[in-house]
Image: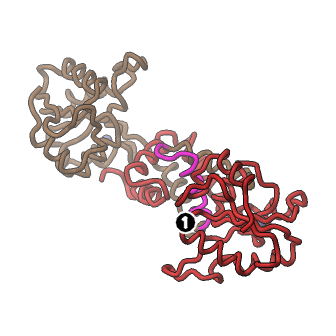
Chain colours: A brown, B red
């Protein structure tokens, strides 16, 4: 290889990012090197800033720059509705649709016997605390329409049964589909047509 | 959006990289934030280093960390063969195949009437200087099998006609294909079967 060790190391790190492979990492690094003053230095600076400031919300698991995120601290979002998602990317997808005005709870994954992920590995105990302490009247289970997603939804529904109104996204989520792949209109339709479990 | 301004800005910058779009940029940034100590900080550090040290070789256009790259300074590579490529990514693809032992000349693109790219916008004058001054006996035109690539090859062949042996990659480069997409074996076969222009 004609490229030096640092450039090779940068390509190797970039190639491990989700969505990139070795070839696109090489293209991206060459692009960044060509525009190093305009792109590479600002990108590196921004990454340093985000590395220093980004953290997970202690309450809901959302990503932000304070211990408790903007949604959890906003009184406007305290409308009694709590939307449970698997991942921060799903929370962002919901926010882009603009249809939901309540708060979120990010589980950080799904229950999985195969991967030995039980309720303690997710934010399920914290969810149950929040339902009791935050005056929640409705829990919307916006989990992916996968087997693990639905298993997790049923487990949470059992835990919260009788304490709160439980709903799930209905119309529009295709079988086997993942929230983060859906367009905003589909998410809006699914949220509006949510049904009692 | 629940993410803060810096996180949004980072996603936006990542989304502009070749090979990434908004969705994969969001996934990549979440992945980096989750592993910020292990991934995001080292990646940012490496980008700073590369931004500070990477430069284009003044002789051939390859990317390296000195004014003249390792291939240009290596006496072992001074075998009289000069391989002309469009892009550094093509040079890297050639190097991965390991078949070529000479030096390179990176044009930095192709001639294009549409985009008003003439010989002066590429490293063509420098190529003609090098052929005269570096004791070059064979110029291998390893340009992409696209219309612009072949137009550029013909232009260079006209300029160097009679001064040096001119060859081009032959067998194995598919019509409309780009070098950087080919496997190493195909590149090796094309190099071994190169033919006189
Ligand atoms: Zn929060
Ligand atoms: Zn060089």
In terms of depth relative to the viewer, which is nearer, B93 or B27? Answer: B93
Quadrant (top left, top right, bottom left, bottom right) of the C terminus of chain A: top left
Confirm if mark 1 falls within 8 A of ligand 2: no
Q: Is residue B42 above or below residue B174?
A: above
Q: Quadrant of residue B59?
A: bottom right
Pointer 1 chain: B
Q: Position of residue B104 (x, y in %)?
A: 75, 64
Q: Is residue B81 above or below residue B125?
A: above
Residue at 63 percent across and 58 percent down: it is B89
Q: Regarding mark 1 in the picture, which secondary structure is present there? A: loop
In terms of depth relative to the viewer, which is nearer, B122 or B52? Answer: B122
Q: Position of residue B69 (x, y in %)?
A: 78, 63
Residue at 48 percent across and 52 percent down: it is A50
Q: Position of residue B57 (x, y in %)?
A: 75, 68
> Magenta stretch?
A18-34
Left or right? Give the position of A83 relative to A192. Answer: right
Residue B127 colored magenta? no
Residue furthest front in the image: B196
Left or right? Give the position of A27 relative to B125. Answer: left
The number of callouts visible is 1
Q: Does the rendering let one see residue A9?
A: yes
* Quarter of the rendered structure image containing ligand 2: bottom right
Q: Is residue B36 above or below residue B108?
A: above
Residue at 61 percent across and 55 percent down: it is B173
Q: Position of residue B98 (x, y in %)?
A: 75, 48
Secondary structure that dominates the magenta span:
helix
Q: Does the rendering let one see residue B67?
A: no
Left or right? Give the position of B143 relative to B130. Answer: left
Residue A24 colored magenta? yes
In terms of depth relative to the viewer, which is nearer, A132 or B29? Answer: B29
Residue at 25 percent across and 39 percent down: it is A104
Residue, disc 1: B146
């Amino acid at each position: 290889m004609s490229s030096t060790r640092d450039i090779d190391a940068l390509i190797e790190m970039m190639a491990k990012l989700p969505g990139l492979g070795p070839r696109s990492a090489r293209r991206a690094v060459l692009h960044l090197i060509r525009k190093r003053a305009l792109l590479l230095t600002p990108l590196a600076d921004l990454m340093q800033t985000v590395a220093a400031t980004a953290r997970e919300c202690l309450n809901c698991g959302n990503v932000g720059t304070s211990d408790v995120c903007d949604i959890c601290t906003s009184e406007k979002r305290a409308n009694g509705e709590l939307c449970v998602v698997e991942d921060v990317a799903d929370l962002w997808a919901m926010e882009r649709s603009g249809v939901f005005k309540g708060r979120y709870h990010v589980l950080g994954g799904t229950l999985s016997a195969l991967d030995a992920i039980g309720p303690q590995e997710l934010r399920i105990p914290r969810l149950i605390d929040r339902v009791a302490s935050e005056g929640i009247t409705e829990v919307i289970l916006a989990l992916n329409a996968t087997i693990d997603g639905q298993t997790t939804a049923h487990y949470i529904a059992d835990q919260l049964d009788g304490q709160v109104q439980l709903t799930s996204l209905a119309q529009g989520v295709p079988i086997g589909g993942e929230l983060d792949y859906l367009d905003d209109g589909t998410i809006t339709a699914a949220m509006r047509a949510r049904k009692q479990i």
